[in-house]
Image: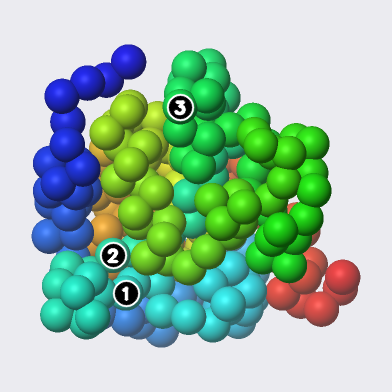
């Protein structure tokens, strides 16, 4: 188990990634170039972006809009539990547990799959800021597993899928995710080309076929 890393220190390590931000929206030329690679129309990619992000920006800012730019992230505790073989489940069920987070409407309900038999505040999905705090907590325990246990950016690609994006390790994957929207769409293209089956459902949904 990882020891000796405080919450503040973990936060500094995580925040260092956010210094990579260069900004800028995806240009029409960039949408078109990726669409050619994936043999689809740019509008399909734009629709998928809207579905995955809920229409929200791919980045948000810390400290009420004055701090670093953070990619949209969703921390998934069941990924972390699996990647760390469950060694943190008993002590940190809020960030490491075999069963993933539940919908907020389940809050307070009995559920035997939760660590204490019911769905508490630490058992439900929350906003990007809460995912950021959960990531910091997990990073204290196992940095690599923590980065792999988030879905990142405009297209919500799991960090665990870094190799499918033609990236050698998850740290470089996060570096790219933290740079710009344009970098994120480039990662999406690599991911889809290596895992075309993952492309079918979102493509059909974006095209209104589901």
Q: Is residue 8 left or right of residue 102?
A: left
Q: Nearer the viewer, residue 136 or 53?
A: 136
Upstream in sequence: badge 3 or badge 2: 2
Q: How is the image coloured?
A: rainbow
Task: Please indicate, yes or no, whether residue 39 appears anywhere in the rendered image.
Answer: yes
Residue bearing mark 1: 60
Q: At which x and y percent is residue 160? A: 48, 35
Upstream in sequence: badge 2 or badge 1: 1
Quarter that holds the C terminus: bottom right
Quarter that holds the N terminus: top left
Identity of the residue drawn at 46% across and 33% down: 92
Q: Which tag is nearer the camera, tag 3 or tag 2?
A: 3
Kindly identify which numbered label has been placed on residue 70. Answer: 2
Identity of the residue drawn at 43% across and 56% down: 131
Instruction: Give yes or no for contact between labels 1 and 3 (Cβ–Cβ under 8 Å).
Output: no
Q: CA distance from mark 2 to mark 1?
A: 5 Å
Instruction: Give yes or no for contact between labels 2 and 1 (Cβ–Cβ under 8 Å).
Output: yes
Identity of the residue drawn at 72% across and 46% down: 118
């Amino acid at each position: 188990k990882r020891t000796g890393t405080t919450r503040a220190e973990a936060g500094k390590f995580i925040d260092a990634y956010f210094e990579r931000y260069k900004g800028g929206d995806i240009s029409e030329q960039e949408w078109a170039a990726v669409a050619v690679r994936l043999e689809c129309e740019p509008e399909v990619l734009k629709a998928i972006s809207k579905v995955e992000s809920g229409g929200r920006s791919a980045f948000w800012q810390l400290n009420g809009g004055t701090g670093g730019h953070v990619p949209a992230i969703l921390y998934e505790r069941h990924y972390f539990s699996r990647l760390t073989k469950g060694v943190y489940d008993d002590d940190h069920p809020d960030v490491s547990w075999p069963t993933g987070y539940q919908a907020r409407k389940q809050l307070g309900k009995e559920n035997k799959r939760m660590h204490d038999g019911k769905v508490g505040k630490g058992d439900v999905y929350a906003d990007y800021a809460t995912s950021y705090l959960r990531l910091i907590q997990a990073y204290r325990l196992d940095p690599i597993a923590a980065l792999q246990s988030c879905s990142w950016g405009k297209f919500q690609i799991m960090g665990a899928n870094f190799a499918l994006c033609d990236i050698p390790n998850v740290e470089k994957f996060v570096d790219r995710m933290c740079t710009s929207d344009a970098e994120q769409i480039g990662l999406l293209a690599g991911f889809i080309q290596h895992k075309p089956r993952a492309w079918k459902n979102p493509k059909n949904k974006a095209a209104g076929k589901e």
